[in-house]
Amino acid sequence: MAKRVLVHRADSIYDDRPDTQYQFPSQYLSRMKPCEGDWIVYYEPRKGGGRLGYNAIAKVQEIISDPSKAGMYLAVIEAGSFLPLEQFVPYQVSNTFYESDLDAGDGSLIQGKMQSAVRPISDDDFLKILQAGIPSSHSVLPRQDEQTGFAEPGQDFAFETERPVVEQLITRKVRDRVFRTKVLQAYDSRCAIT
């Protein structure tokens, strides 16, 4: 298994649907086959109105021949694994590349490497992109500049009767923190109802 960077343009000529499949020609099959069962990161190039950076991750379930077009292949994305990054990650920050293979050694770009539609990425570089795109601290909520707690010291509550403890197994949907962040940004961190 090996992680990959996949170039995806909004105006792509391929039948790409980043959350379900990535279509590619046979010339990339040998590069794509090792990433079956591993993660990929989507990169936006300048062409097609892109921002030159990374915008999402996903896990490749399998590589198959495209049943609708001869000579083409599909990277089938594992259901539920597609995750847009909370923050767009530019490919370079302060002369440092998130993909270390792009660095010529002097802080400049190795010409031609960025044009490859499928390129390998190390686990360390993938993790750096992930940490930049999904930061562990939230600047929106909870608000850290506000004082929490109560003015008076807490009092223990005395139960009149002992309450039974019941063990339960529940199934519920996991909330998407990227969706939460986007909603908070859309409403400028204010209540959408009032």
Image: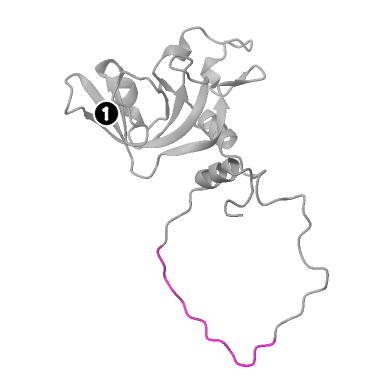
Q: Residue 93 sits in which quadrant? A: top right
Q: Is residue 151 left or right of residue 101?
A: right
Q: Residue at x 77, y 49 (%)?
A: 145
Three-letter amino acid code of the residue under disc 1: Leu
> What percent of the width, then of the height, locates residue 165?
52, 82
Q: Is residue 85 above or below residue 99?
A: below
| Magenta residues, start to end | 158-171
Which quadrant, please, contains the C terminus?
bottom right
Q: Residue 68 sits in which quadrant? A: top left
Q: Residue at x 18, y 22 (%)?
A: 69
Which secondary structure class fits the magenta region best? loop
Q: Is residue 31 above or below residue 110?
A: below
Q: List the single residue furthest toward the top.
A: 111
Q: Residue 168 sits in which quadrant? A: bottom left
* Number of numbered markers: 1
Q: Is residue 166 magenta?
A: yes
Q: Is residue 70 left or right of residue 126?
A: left
Q: Is residue 135 above or below residue 143?
A: above
Q: Residue at x 76, y 64 (%)?
A: 149
Q: Nearer the viewer, residue 132 or 190?
A: 190
Q: List the single residue furthest toward the bottom.
A: 160
> What percent of the width, then of the height, locates residue 138?
64, 45
Q: Secondary structure at mark 1?
A: strand
Q: Which residue is mark 1?
A: 74
> What percent of the width, then of the height, locates residue 17?
33, 31
Which quadrant, please, contains the N terminus?
top left
